[in-house]
Image: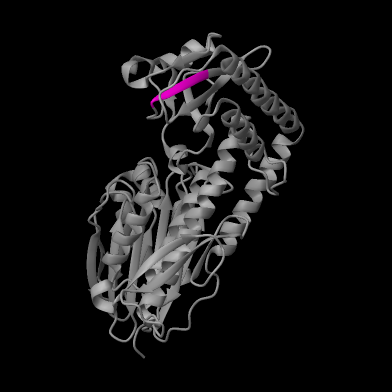
């Protein structure tokens, strides 16, 4: 950007000033993305291309900021096994835990704090709240309790003080700090986790300080117990309502109005296995008159999958504004997806660009989606499976170009449809599905899609996966 346009992008914390706003989950501006000239020029105005890139990046940064804020709140609620609240209150459990940890650091003059909670099987410890630690820590997998020697000792009732963590590696300090202290968090009847206090300086924790931390750990346990009592009254009802709201929002975000594109017809269908899920489809017109089509499929269950699907759809729309081709877009979306996860979040994506005047379609795929070319004379499976989004920095998406002839169609399907057909009849299931679509090829796209759905329904198999079918047909010449 410096060489091409003579400017660069700079991020600044705070809401004041000009630039592209980055907002959090509550709609507050947390920072701004500025376009700065290399040379000192008071009359500098960013080129249109740079402004578009900066706007898209600010939008993605806002999405990441919202996801981080929501993730921290969800983790805090999971500490008490509380479902995510549809309305955030001023007394949110995450804010309470933050305040308690802040008081702990001030009392013992330490640098950072973390609360790790036991899972239901008491075999793992998961970070549920933290202060002065990177947000990415929440994305890391839980620590096995059997290997967490310091936590085991603390849960047995003994505070553990590590004056020099480098000399005591067998205690398995979860963060790279010179000194640390581990305190049990327990109710009157059960141990529920540990409170870790970290120091940036080599130091000891006195008896008075450990006693203070034990009192603070008791306060944490009390806060969690209180929220558990509140949860007992509203758990099932609230969770049902929340999932219903998420499902309604997901359905609302699916496209319901077809673009008016002469000579072309398209139809899409998404069905989640549960109330909410990770599948979605989308279409949109690009600035050059081309039509972009998308099928996305995020791993996970319900809320997790729905959140990932929203992140994936947002990244596609943002990058779609300036990516020169389908393969570049998938690579850029993968980089966004990979860089905002801890290596345990995966998804599939098929993205196509249709040039209506010429009939040229370019499609890039990463993951386990399936694509079929249906013609009056036969059918062809368009690509094989590849690396999932988020699996590595470079997924090397499958890429193809086809010039769709009048009277032919392309169908893109999520991994759930592929799995459904394979479980029934293996490779023959895909062939049966393709032939069913070909039998209805003379009909509009929505009727072709309906034929595919009817075939799935006749298989009488339990719906264990989210499913999406997208049909694009080039109408016959008159």
**Residue at 56% over, 47% down:** 70
Towards the viewer: 446 or 223: 223
Above or below, comparing residue 452 to residue 156 in the picture? below
Above or below, comparing residue 378 to residue 181 in the picture? below
Towards the viewer: 88 or 440: 88
The question of residue 179 being in magenta is answered with yes
- Residue 48 in view: yes
- The colouring scheme, among rainbow, by chain, secondary structure or one colour, is one colour
Q: Which percent across, then down, holds residue 382?
A: 25, 62
Q: Which of the 4 image quadrants contains residue 93?
A: top right
**Residue at 59% over, 63% down:** 252
**Residue at 66% over, 47% down:** 242
The question of residue 70 being in magenta is answered with no
Towards the viewer: 1 or 445: 1
How many numbered marks, from 0 up?
0
Q: Which of the 4 image quadrants contains residue 435?
A: bottom left
**Residue at 59% over, 55% down:** 25
Magenta span: predominant SS is strand
Q: Which residues are magenta?
A: 178-182
Q: Which percent across, then down, holds residue 2?
A: 27, 72
Towards the viewer: 109 or 408: 109
Query: Which quadrant holds the N terminus?
Result: bottom left
Q: Which percent across, then down, holds residue 328?
A: 27, 66
């Amino acid at each position: 950007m410096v060489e091409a346009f003579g400017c660069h992008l700079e991020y600044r914390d705070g809401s004041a000033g000009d630039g592209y706003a980055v907002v959090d989950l509550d709609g507050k501006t947390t920072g701004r993305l500025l376009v700065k000239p290399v040379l000192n020029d008071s009359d500098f105005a960013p080129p249109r291309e740079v402004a578009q890139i900066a706007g898209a990046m600010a939008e993605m940064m806002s999405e990441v900021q919202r996801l981080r804020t929501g993730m921290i709140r969800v983790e805090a609620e999971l500490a008490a096994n509380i479902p995510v609240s549809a309305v955030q209150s001023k007394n949110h459990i995450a804010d309470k835990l933050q305040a308690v940890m802040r008081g702990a650091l001030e009392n013992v003059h330490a640098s950072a704090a973390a609360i790790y909670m036991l899972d239901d099987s008491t075999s793992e410890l998961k970070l549920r709240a933290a202060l002065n630690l990177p947000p990415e820590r929440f994305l890391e997998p839980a620590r096995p309790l059997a290997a967490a020697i310091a936590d085991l000792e603390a849960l047995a009732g003994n505070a553990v003080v590590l004056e020099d963590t480098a000399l005591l590696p067998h205690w398995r300090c979860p963060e790279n700090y010179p000194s640390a202290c581990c305190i049990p968090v327990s109710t009157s009847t059960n141990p529920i986790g540990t409170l870790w206090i970290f120091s940036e300086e080599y130091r000891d924790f006195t008896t008075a300080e450990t006693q203070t931390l034990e009192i603070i750990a008791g306060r944490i346990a009390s806060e969690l117990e209180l929220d558990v009592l509140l949860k007992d009254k509203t758990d099932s009802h609230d969770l049902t309502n929340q999932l219903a709201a998420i499902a309604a929002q997901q359905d609302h975000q699916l496209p319901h109005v077809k673009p008016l594109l002469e000579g072309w017809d398209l139809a899409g269908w998404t069905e989640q296995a549960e109330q909410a899920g990770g599948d979605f489809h989308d279409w949109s017109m690009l600035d050059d008159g081309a039509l972009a089509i998308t099928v996305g499929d995020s791993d996970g269950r319900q809320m997790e999958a729905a959140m990932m699907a929203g992140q994936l759809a947002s990244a596609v729309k943002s990058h779609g504004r300036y990516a020169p081709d389908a393969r570049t877009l998938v690579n850029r979306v993968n980089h966004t997806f990979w860089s905002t996860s801890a290596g345990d979040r995966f998804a599939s994506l098929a993205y196509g660009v249709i040039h209506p005047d010429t009939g040229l379609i370019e499609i890039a795929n990463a993951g386990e989606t399936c694509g079929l070319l249906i013609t009056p004379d036969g059918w062809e499976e368009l690509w094989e499976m590849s690396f999932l989004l988020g699996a590595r920095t470079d997924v090397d998406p499958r890429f193809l170009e086809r010039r769709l002839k009048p009277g032919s169609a392309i169908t893109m399907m999520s991994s759930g449809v592929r799995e459904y057909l394979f479980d029934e009849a293996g490779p023959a299931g895909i062939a049966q599905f393709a032939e069913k679509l070909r039998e209805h090829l003379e009909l509009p796209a929505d009727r072709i899609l309906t034929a595919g759905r009817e075939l799935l329904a006749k298989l009488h198999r339990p719906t264990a996966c989210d499913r999406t079918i997208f049909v694009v047909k080039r109408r016959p010449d008159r």
